[in-house]
Image: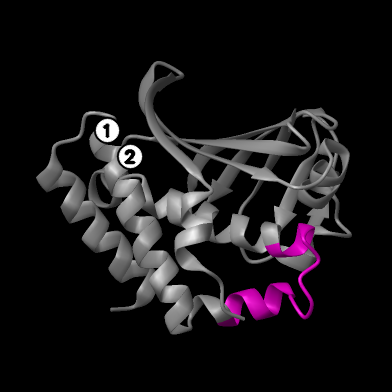
Amino acid sequence: MDIDVTQHLGTVTREVASRDQDGKPAKAVIVSRTYDTTPADLWDAFTTAERLPRWFLPISGDLRPGGRYQLQGNAGGEILVCDPPRHLKLTWEFGGQTSWVEVRIAKHGSGSRLTLEHLVPVDDHWNQYGPGATGVGWDLALVGLTQHVAAVQGFTAEAGMQWMMSENGKSFVRGSSDAWGRANIASGTDEATAAAAVSRTTAAYTGV
């Protein structure tokens, strides 16, 4: 699978914002994209155990407010808010760290707009990689969601993983990392710090 890298990167809005979480500084990595489908269908694709494995990862657990979920080989956590088809909020627990993911879906013209905010603590990991570590990951995930919602022939989550390692996939990663660097600068980070974080993030994702 190959995609139009410039087109996919250009359809996403990216923002970095300062927040406070439990009295401690945090950063919100915010990504937004419009899909040519209904809010109900987009919600179903993003939240159900049947459809998530088709573009992202298998999920298990008690998938209702107060329940706990587990993404296979990745994050787990508690479902804090589940208001179909508009609002989802959950903890994102991975590698001994807890962050928070909030998803909102709204009708937008003839389609639907998904806005995802991932709130992460300002720690050594953030200081080293900036928003790209989180942002590039979600950019990649939203490519998969786009392929799935559009019912692209032959697309599977496994094909998406293989694409990530292709030159086309790495080109997308480089472009995404650069875009998050620009969002980081727009949030007030100095250019040298942002550029260093972009370099580390790109290397981590591409293995170069």
Q: Which residue is mark 1?
A: 186
Q: Which residues are magenta?
A: 147-162
Q: For the residue marked with disc 1, what is the amino acid?
A: Ala
| Residue in the picture at 65% in, 63% down | 144
Determine the residue located farthest toward the front in the rendered image. Answer: 110
Q: Is residue 177 magenta?
A: no
Q: Is residue 158 magenta?
A: yes
Q: Which residue is mark 2?
A: 183
Secondary structure beneath disc 2?
A: helix
- Relative to residue 163, is residue 21 drawn left or right? left
Q: CA distance from mark 2 to mark 1?
A: 5 Å
Colour option used: one colour
Q: Residues within 10 Å of mark 2 (few under 14, many from 20)?
A: many
Q: Give the image location of residue 113, x and y in percent.
A: 68, 36
| Residue in the picture at 40% in, 57% down | 176
Secondary structure beneath disc 1?
A: helix
Q: Give the image location of residue 47, x and y in percent.
A: 80, 46
Q: Is residue 169 above or below residue 106?
A: below
